[in-house]
Image (cartoon, rainbow, N blue to C red):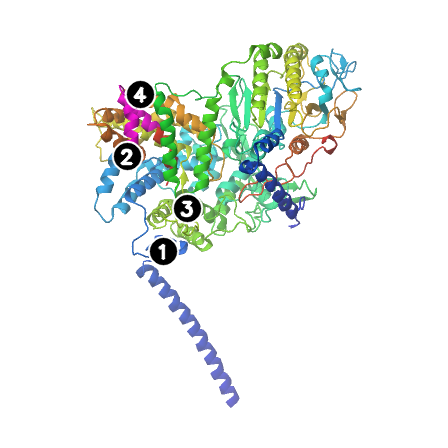
Amino acid sequence: MIGNDWHMIGRWMWIIIGCMNRIMLMLLVMLALVTTVEGQELLRDRIDTEIGLNPVTDDGSQSICTDFEFIRRVYIDVTGRHPTAEAVVTFVSDQSQKKREQLIDQLLSSPEHARRLQHHFDVMLLQRLPKKQIELTNWQQYLFESMHSNKPWNQLVHELLTVDGTDAATRPAARFILARELKREETVRAIGQTLLGRDLQCAQCHDHPSVGDYLQRHYYGISAFLSRSYLFTDPKSKVVSIGEKAEGDVKFTSVFTNEEDATSPRILDLDAIDDPTIEEEPYVVKPDNNNRGVPKYSRRLQLASELTSEANSAFRLNIANRIWALYMGRGIVEPLDMFHADNPPSHPHLLEELAQFLVDQNYDLRTLTREILLSKTYQQPSKRPSESQNSEPFVIAELKPLSPEQLGLCLLQATGVLQTIYEKHRVALTEGEDAIDETTAEFKTNLEAAVNKETATHLDKVVTTFASANQSSRFDAAANQALFLLNSPLIQEWLDQPENLLIKKLKSAENVSEAVSHVYITVLSRNPSSDELDLASDLVREFDSEQVAGYQHIIRLLICSAEFRFNH
Amino acid sequence: MASHRNQGCNVLDHRMSRRNFVMGASAAAGFGPLLTPAMAKQAKGQQKQILQVYLQGGVSQFESWDCKPGTKYGGPFREIQTTVPGMKICELLPYTAQKMHLLSIIRSINLKTNDHGVGRLFMEKGRTVGDYPYIGSVASRYLKNANDPLPGYIHISTRGLTDNTAAFLEAQHGQMKLEGVAPPENLLPRTGIPESVLTKSEQFRLQLNKQFGTGRSKSLIDSYDASFDQASQLMARKHLFESQPEKDLNRYGHHPFGQNCLLARRLLEEGVTCVKVTHHGYDTHAENFNFHIEQLDEFDKTFATLLGDIEDRGMLDNVLVMVYSEFGRTPKINNKYGRDHWGASCSIALGGAGIQPGAIIGATNADGTEVSDREVDGGHLFHTYMQAVGINSTSDHDIPGRSVPIGDPAASAIEELLA
């Protein structure tokens, strides 16, 4: 009996100890919850900690970029263009403690931010493919609206993969697939690169010869989701949309080994997705010459769910890395489409946190962007104070080459054209019978639409000269681009427009140095140093009779500078 | 699920060959200050270059390099003797026939496509699909001396598509397209700038970049500055585009192809790594024979003159010359006396640099309907071109963070053609 008692006591003790473990665990969890709420460990601070930023230097001063640098950087990153001279002057003289946060919020909610993201995601998702089936303006409008309403990323991707193109209202989203005509090599590659961070191109014909993680079955696993889909041309309207069959499997052969293999749909190394058993009729609409096939079970719709599901960490890590790279100038995994074991992230824990933040925030890209921009890491100077300083990534701000679209907008801004166009449409919208109040959201959106329309042709020229399909964020420069900046008659046309407000302002300046200072702040968002002021003023005076030509010349020199070419 | 790995090429091999290769490339690019002028000149003389003559639309192999006179599909033309005993080509190429001891012919190309776009990409990139750089961009990337003033890849054409030829390589290795002999866009300086301002302006720009560059990424700013250097070198050579020497034009022909080929020679002399000249108009779905008389008449004398000039200048040891199309033409003659697209058995001619001259590689059957010996495709050709100019096409591209084989690992060079 005694033995039994001891046995009982022993059991109770184990149970108590077991409970204590659980209680301890619960307490820890609660503590953790409290600290997240109470301790305010905001993502922006977590970023700085993970980067290992030491924002206070030895002499007690904070390492942070100047207001001039900050306003230029954040304008280009968020709106795609640098600030007007007036915006710079106002911001720099603002004494408010919260002015950076206020500016970030103002810019993030502006339609200009939506346009910037429209440009960015257009290039990322469509890789500058030519028009096919879908009007480019409709696609651009769809992206603009998605970005302006801050549509969750998973929802956007879901639309890109599932829209079949039969409904005019949602048809523009089908461009992701229709522009590639559902060609396997293009569509699967684009999904891998842009949505999963993996360029599986080499895995099409064989397992990647030197990237151990990229296997042929990864490529064909994604391919299997799409292999039953096909382009359907309506016999009457000739409209092309996406149909799907209910059967067909994917086989592949390695060109090296000639071994044949097969795979069900699967995302990378996740489990294969077997088709559900469907009794009797597998079709909602049977495919034939007159009817677009619609199966009861669609592998393509399944792809959208599987790809964006929580089980697929590649989806969230990819977009977290891409948003980070967009504002920080390089990815935590770089190149952005080279996630694999031999190319580890520079800050793995941070990348996980950014991705988890996105999941917790329902893939709200704007909120993530806001935290990144508010971090001290984002607001570091790009200039190293001394050679000896630590060159770990992100400890000083990277130089970001302007994208072709950013460069185009900045050129229009620097030559006074953008401001002139804005002013023209502002007046048009606020006068006359249909006048709109300038403070309304409607006004802002209409103004942006009108300006976009008018700048489109100017932008196209710059984009064709500077664009390459290069997916990496490496910087490129070619002679024809330099020739464009140096000599292009187009830029001269912009500067010679009679209504150009910048040139008018320079003409009315009191003296040469006032005008030159205005040129500097307009083009480079900063004041000239006294040496620069002297040198530039001397150059202007060499154009003795025609001072305007002198100012134009200084503008053209400044737009050829590296300081202008990079966001810094 | 089988989890076998395809070990087509060994990772270690990749790394080893890449290292050797990169060392070779950096030695070639970086020795400027270490060499005496004489040595530098000698080294420059050894720099490999490429001349591509692209017969756009698909030249007929029957009417050029692979005649089948007197056979079912042979067409009306005879074959003629060349300077290589036993090597016969079509009578439409009499001048080229006198230069065949400088060239070799490949008659056994099967591209497995009859599509212009796919065929062209296969011939340029050595792959049928995917985002890979063109021959000219790869050459520019690995052969161009960092100090060479002109762009590494210039394409002279009178029309055609703008391709992203550099793919993942740097933009400076993308082709610079010239519309015939017209100067590149934006080449001419702005007017109305006082002479006194020009030098000061250049100093002003350099000073600005120097100041901005202090404490910032040197490589980015250097490559930006380099593009302006290249631009000003081009501007300084605007004479190349102003007029072609009359005496030479009389030899090359005054027609656009003649002018373009003359410009090509002058650009090669200026050290441009890869010059491509396109001769348009070989897509002869109707009147194949009349069109070939016209087209090849223009091609033959001009090309033979250009090849002769390259040889006379002692450049042929270092210049790979290739004459190619996106495919050939059907054996069957259609009811409009045309021949249609045919990728299954076509030919090219090539020579110079590391190519054995005077050889005939492969063969087609008696009627020319299929390859009967030594079948090759665009992948094999790409490896062959690259190795002929000293690029190890079995190594990987020198791109940070990526591992992309230069040539298709499933194909290899035509070894017997390499000198």
The image quarter containing residue A33 is bottom left
Find out whether residue A551 is within the magenta segment: yes
Q: Of callouts 3 and 2, which one flags the residue occurring earlier in the amino acid sequence?
A: 3
Looking at the picture, which amino acid does disc 2 mark? Ile
Image position, residue A453 (x, y; %): 35, 26
Any mark on residue A496, and which? 4
Q: Can residue A105 be seen at all in this image of the molecule?
A: no
Image position, residue B103 (x, y; %): 71, 23
Any mark on residue A324, and which? 3
Looking at the picture, which amino acid does disc 1 mark? Asn
Looking at the picture, which amino acid does disc 4 mark? Asp
Q: Do the residues labelled 3 and 2 touch (CB within 8 Å)?
A: no
**Mark 1 surroundings: few (<14), some (14-19) or many (≥20) residues within 10 A:** some
Looking at the picture, which amino acid does disc 3 mark? Trp
Are discs 3 and 2 located on one and the same chain? Answer: yes
The residue segment tinted magenta is A533-556
Any mark on residue A54, and which? 1
Give the CA distance from mark 3 to mark 2: 29 Å
Closer to the camera in the image, A191 or A13:
A191
Q: Of callouts 2 and 4, which one flags the residue occurring earlier in the amino acid sequence?
A: 4
Residue at the bottom extreme, as displayed: A2
Q: Which of the two discs, 3 and 1, sits closer to the camera?
A: 1
Are discs 3 and 4 located on one and the same chain? Answer: yes
Q: Which chain carries label 3?
A: A
The image quarter containing residue B92 is top right
Image position, residue B61 (x, y; %): 70, 19
On the image, numbered disc 2 is attached to which residue?
A521
